[in-house]
Image: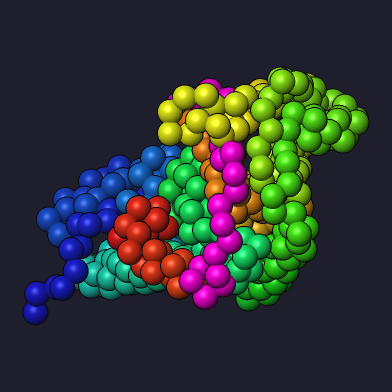
Amino acid sequence: MQNQYDLKRYAVLYVDDEEKALKYFEKSFSDEFRILTASSAAEGLKLIEQHGDDIGVLLSDQRMPGEKGVQLLERVRQSRPRLVRMMVTAYADYDATVDAVNLGNIFRYVSKPIHMEDMRNTLHRAMEFYILQQEHHDLLREKLSVLQNMLVTDRVLGLGIVAAGLGQNLRQPLRAVHAFLDLTPGRLGQSSFDLDRLRDASFWRDFHGHVVKQAGSIATLLGDLQNGQAGTAGSTVDAATIKAVLASHKDAFTTKGIELVDNVDSALPAIQTDAAAVIKMLELLLQTEGALLSSGAKVTLSAEGIKDGADAGSLRLTLTDSASGLPAATLRSVLDPFATQEDAQATPGLSLLGACFLASHLGGSIRAPRGAQNTRLDITLPATAPAPQSTTDGSREFITNVLMNDILWERLLPNV
């Protein structure tokens, strides 16, 4: 019966100090298998490091100069546990057999002289076992990747729905989520999984705790935004307002060794908007910078009135720092369910997300220009805040727009 597996998909490595044994083994089985040979344990380890997961089966002679076969099998078991390991020896060495089973977790014990037909059948079973392991591993990875994408999507939808639920106190949640995603250095779904860690029950207990903390942090943040905005519509924001926020954070930045530069023009024209929302947005942005930067860094906030174009009359704020850009981990800490933080309450990405929600609430936006060497955020605020939107309409618009927004889905589900 024809074998259903490609037996040359992965290599067989045979380690033996007898040159003739290596040549005979390769000649006998090279038609059916990809054969690699090594004359010592050290040489075998080198080949395993070079070829990585391309090797599926390892056979090692026990009696070799230097490191013995059982020692090689034990080391390989620790570094590549899925590699199928077998012991080959010409001696009736009971102790070596026990050690090979206990320390190297071998698949089979083979005695010399090797019987060709028995060895062929053994290699077939060993390679099939390895291929099945790999297929199971790949399937699990694929399922976890799909699970992650579902959780990421659910996280973003949930954030938007909560934001939409704040009704008149927070507008255009989809726009805010989309703006936040635009800040990401790369696609969110391109994560590597430590499958052995994910099989550990303690990981899921810790993960559950992280999700509970993160959900609580998001609810608290959005609740604070709602409470802080009551009755502030129509108030004025001018240069003095912005300078006061910078002054209130000066001491904290100085204590940390970060230079905070006020580059706001005192003649900045005033805009009619929610002053409390603008102040909260600036505080969240400064909190993000303070959490990410270390001593010696420099943060500059500039402000100017836009005189020409479609945004004429609007206010443009530019926040720059001396860092090399927003870390992907900051954004993953909010949107990626497999990203963990020791203290979810202090997650910088959460503050950045809140700032995006507030900019959107004010009818403006936060953007990070592509190609900038250092972190730069451009914040645009209109001369007059938009009219409130009803809770029902806001929620309905958010759900409809998410389901129809191809760009958003492309960012959330990069593997589709």
Q: Is residue 202 visible?
A: no
Q: Is residue 2 above or below residue 350?
A: below
Q: Quadrant of residue 207?
A: bottom right
Viewer-proximal residue among 261 and 136: 261
Q: Position of residue 297 (x, y in %)?
A: 74, 24
Q: Position of residue 368 (x, y in %)?
A: 52, 35
Q: Quadrant of residue 4?
A: bottom left
- The boundaries of the magenta stretch are 370-394
Q: Name the quadrant of the C terminus.
A: bottom left
Q: Position of residue 353 (x, y in %)?
A: 62, 52
Viewer-proximal residue among 216 and 145: 216
Given the current orientation, which residue lies at the most extreme left position? 1
How was the colour assigned to the protein in this rendering? Answer: rainbow
Residue under the point 9% across and 79% down? 1
Q: Is residue 101 above or below residue 416?
A: below
* 243 with respect to 199 (left or right): right
Does 386 lie within the magenta span? yes
Residue under the point 72% across and 63% down? 226
Q: Position of residue 216 (x, y in %)?
A: 73, 69
Viewer-proximal residue among 171 and 385: 385
Magenta span dominant secondary structure: loop
Viewer-proximal residue among 163 and 126: 163
Residue under the point 32% across and 68% down? 135
